[in-house]
Amino acid sequence: MSENQKTYTRFSLAERIEHIVLIASFTTLAVTGLVQKFAQSSISISIIAALGGIEITRIIHRAAAIVFLVQAIYHLVAIGYKLYVQRKEASMLPGFKDLQDAFQHFLYNLGLRKERPKMDRYNFVEKAEYWAMVWGLVLMALTGFMMWNPIATARILPGQAIPAAKVAHGAEAILAVLAIFIWHFYHVHLRTFNKSMFTGKLSRHEMEEEHALELEKIEKGLLPPPPSPEELKRRKRIYYPVAAVLSLILLFFVYRFVTYEQTAITTIPPVSAQSENVFVPQTPTPLPTRPPTPTSIPTPAGQSFEGPLSWNNGIGQILVQRCGSCHGAMGGLALNSYETAMKGGRSGAVIVAGDSEASRLVTTVRDGNHPGKFEPQELELIIRWIQEGAQE
Amino acid sequence: MANRYRYSSRLLVVAIAVVFVAIGLAGVVSQNKPQIVLAEAPLVEKGQLPNNAACLSCHMVEGQVKEFPNGDLISVVIAPETYGLSAHATLSCQVCHTNISGYPHPENLAQSSRDYTLQYQNTCNQCHPSQATELLDSVHSKIMAEGNLNAPICADCHNPHEQPKIKKDEQGRLTAVEHAQSAMVCGQCHSTIYEDYAKSVHGTGVLVDKNPDVPSCIDCHGVHSVRGPIGGAAFRLSSPKICADCHTNEEIMSKYGLSTQVLQTYIADFHGTTVTLFEKLDPDQQINMPVCYDCHGVHDIRRADDPEKGLQVKQNLLATCQKCHPDATENFPDAWLSHYIPDRNRYPLVYWVNEFYKYFIPTVLGGMGLFVVSDIYRRWVVDRRKKNSIPAETVVESQKETQDSDSLQDQQEIKSVEEENQITDEKRQDEENS
């Protein structure tokens, strides 16, 4: 029983923190990235709205990408430390045995083998996931750079590399997220809840099932002994400066990644010069600049009259033609017959026989306030007719 | 008896009246043209021409002008033959000129010809209430409310003395001539835009070819509720929909061999995605992503293969990109797929990457899924069956582990299998020995 309760340290605190940072950055990238890939779906729109709009969503995505990259640099330095300073086995490297293990495990699952394959510190499940992650990171970083800096990209590559990068970036995202769901969640959450990434420890049973070979090595004392303190000290003296320089160089790359180019201007110019002044009326048809004289309608005024002027001899014709359209059948003053003309309108007579100056027919028109006018000749004839007694 | 008789005769009168009113109403309803409420026009009796002779006797005389205190002159001549052909021929002058009933005319306080026109701002809605309401939603009414007196009122576009009845076809669309005419109306005030438009692919289609498929001003901006980019970004952000109205219509586009994928491919791209999202979430935000007209031109839209401005010409496309991406070089325009969906010949790199993932993703996930399913089968079917017949070692051990790592969990279950454990332990010993 005591043997069963024994635990085996699997992940150091630093590694566990690294994993938590990875969860945070990966999840952020997945959420903010997938809503951009499927931007027209209503779920995406509500997530984008909740995040504060597409611009902020993009900024969050890029910030998470930077965290992801910086973490990758840290991871490289940490691996270097393990391999060079601690001289640990490169246990994550994939090999032919992993293929074999996977196949044998599959056969075991189908009941075609009695035993699970015995697997080392990192079994094929973990290696598949780790290297998928590495592949994903490299591909996402490259394609991400191309989309982040399209102008620089198009200087070297054909332009269509950028939409191709977008396709790859999006497809890889789907692959990564679904792989996490299918592979990772099944193996460490569903099949058994493997807490080692948080507690740092595995139970003996878990070791037996997943890392039987490592367990065997531990128990048989086959693992290489830790280096002596002097040796460690010596290697650290070499490794630290090299790691510092390398990580600075890589961090500089990340910095360039972020600040490489100003892709577009931030405010667009107005679409056309006209948008500033849209009201440009066409030159209107020029109007006459002085009140014109009405074109004359030929009247009897031009004719010569034989005999004395009378309504029937000339005057009636003038008045009917000049005034009749208004002062006719419309009521009020009617100048279309001798009787009504002499009778006048609502405000009395307009013709006073023998006194043209008292006749409003003459004064109103002559004062210029009446819309209808007589030709001067006509007015003369009318005045003469009134002076002569306004005969019928 | 006599009373009753009188009563019933009164009823008869009422009944007849009701019947007549009903017939009358039915007539009104059946003839009802919702847009024009002629019934409200006073002084007009059906079928009878108004007696405008009194007014025309003066106003038909050519050359008459009215002068305003600011020196403006307007012609006050009405040509009877033009007026007679207008939609308003059956109206007496006083329907609109309500304040003028005789001569001399009452003094008018308008200081300018514009003042004078604006006095008639609310005249038309007596008979044309729906158009007047639409006008209230327009940019024209908006800038008028802001104090811009140049903003047009009804009479500025429809000369009330000359405007004939607008001719429409059976489907209620403007006839080709009217359609072209409408652009010229807008051109009266927007002459520079009109000149650009007249040279564009749309303008020549409307003005020269008289093609009703092609948009005139009103098709994009609306007729009375005229919309435009004034005040806020809403018009700009929603403008792709305006273009898409026709450019995603297979029936129209197929006649000219034009693609209907233009909207879909635009939205799929960075620019279109952004614009669409802003349009939905923040429609008044000015953003620097282009809408259709930022690349294709606003009113001066040319054919895609136009040597001067067409975007199929690589140099023109690069120049267009450079408006917003000043550092863009020769390859850059290809980053935009020009509204095409990639295939083997066009943008093959994009096509093949897409194809690769089409098989790569199912392969990887399928492989993972296959293994996971086999594992589930092993653990939940085979091992459980074993456990039920003879408690299998793995199951029991995993129970123990659960107890080890979390002693509180599953205690009851563990108790129940505790007895079995001892038996199993013995059995395992046996198995190992053998």
Image (spheres, rainbow, N blue to C red):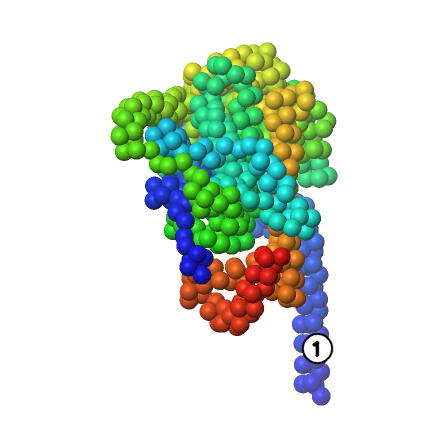
Q: Nearer the viewer, residue B239 or A222?
A: A222
- Residue at image x 46%, y 19%? A151
- Secondary structure beneath dot 1 equals helix
The chain containing the residue under callout 1 comes to B
Q: Residue at x 41, y 40 (%)?
A: A22
- Asked if residue B250 can be seen in this view, the reply is yes
At 68% across and 68% down in the image, what residue appears?
Answer: B18
Residue B193 versus residue A177 in the image, above or below:
above
Q: Residue type at mark 1?
A: Ser
Residue B167 placement (x, y as % from top left): 67, 35
Q: Nearer the viewer, residue B71 or B328?
A: B328
Near mark 1 (Cα within 10 A), the count class, few <14, some 14-19 or many ≥20, is few
Q: Is residue B394 left or right of residue B177?
A: left
Residue A42: x and y in percent read 53, 47
For the image, the number of numbered tags is 1
Asked if residue B206 is positioned above or below residue B153 in the image, the reply reads: above
Relative to A259, B347 lies left or right:
right
Q: Picture coordinates of residue B314 (x, y %)? A: 57, 13
Name the residue at the bottom extreme: B1
Q: Is residue A19 above or below residue B349?
A: below
- Which residue, given by chain and number where applicable, does mark 1 sit on? B9
Q: Quadrant of the N terminus of chain A?
A: bottom left
Residue A135, percent across and down? Answer: 51, 31
- Foreground residue, A180 or B58? A180
Position of the C terminus of chain A, as image quadrant, is: top right
Left or right: residue A160 versus residue A354 is right
> Does the image show residue A281?
no
Of A179 and A198, the residue lying toward us = A198
Identify which residue is drawn at 38% across, 31% down: A87
Residue B80 image-quadrant placement: top right
